[in-house]
Amino acid sequence: MAAIAFGSLVTPPPAAGEIPAIASRQRAERKAFTDAEITDGFMKTAFGAEYHLAGRVDRIRKYGMPVRVFADGNRADREAQLAKVVADIGKRIAHLDIAMAATSDAANILVKLVRDRDLDRTIARFYGRERAREIKTSLDPQCLSGFRKNEQYEIEHSEVILTVDSGDFTFLDCAYEELLQALGPINDTSSVPWTMFNDQVSMGFFDVYDQYILNILYDPRIKAGMTVEEVRAALPGVLTDVRAWVRKVNDLPE
């Protein structure tokens, strides 16, 4: 009977603004930041890694190609929410071509939608039992993302694992954070209070501060493999254009 109900009656997922926990955060969101505050958050999230398997993490990592996302799961409502998240990300990052893919073969970001009880098993299947134990011990994740990069630090493929049965707010919060981290800024930081890449911060939407971080990362002047010093040299010009874009797409005052 459950299979019949899910197969024949699919309730449209609520929009982010209809979820009270998200709406209240959007009303309270801080939207004005200094160049120093934006730069600090970018440097702390775009360099380093909360948990990394191999290779150096002191260089910029990003996609240099169109990004296509495939949802692997059997929850039509969550797939619909994920598609809205992807469309929102594409709308708010100026130089990123991102969209859903019809098949896994056409995608370079695979989003695995799993039940909460299957999360540990899925992580073990993706990363192996030993790595899964290390991830569980160090992160104890509710959702997870990771990527594979080449020798030029260009991301070639990302995996995202999301649980589908933890409620709309948790699903959307995880979907935004993990998809955005799968694009490059994979380092969590507890010292920046305005970013969703802080384990103590839950947003459920693509906030203005993190739009600054992702738009800096995907500006053409910020290239995969750049060092901290190279990024700092490029940032003044990049920040000017990023500010103009974020202001326009969010209808912010001058």
Image (cartoon, helix red, strand yellow):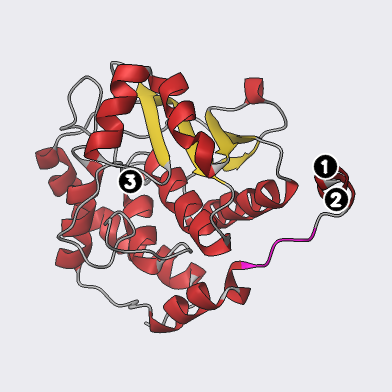
Amino acid type of the residue tagged 3 in the rendering: Leu
Segment tinted magenta in the rendering:
11-15
Give the image quarter of residue 231: top left
Q: Nearer the viewer, mark 3 or mark 2?
A: 2
Q: CA distance from mark 3 to mark 2?
A: 43 Å
Q: Nearer the viewer, mark 3 or mark 1?
A: 1
Give percent across and percent down for residue 98: 56, 42
Mark 2 lies on residue? 5
Query: How crowded is the residue under tag 2: few (<14 C-alpha within 10 Å), some, or many (20+)?
Result: few
Work out whether residue 50 can be spotted: no
Give percent across and percent down for residue 22: 50, 72
Residue 250 against residue 10 in the figure, above or below = below
Residue at 70% across, 51% down: 80
Amino acid type of the residue tagged 1 in the rendering: Ala
Q: CA distance from mark 1 to mark 2?
A: 5 Å
SS label for mark 1: helix
Residue at 71% across, 52% down: 77
Amino acid type of the residue tagged 2 in the rendering: Ala
Left/right placement of residue 192 relative to residue 179 reads: left
Mark 1 lies on residue? 3
Residue 217 numbered tag: 3
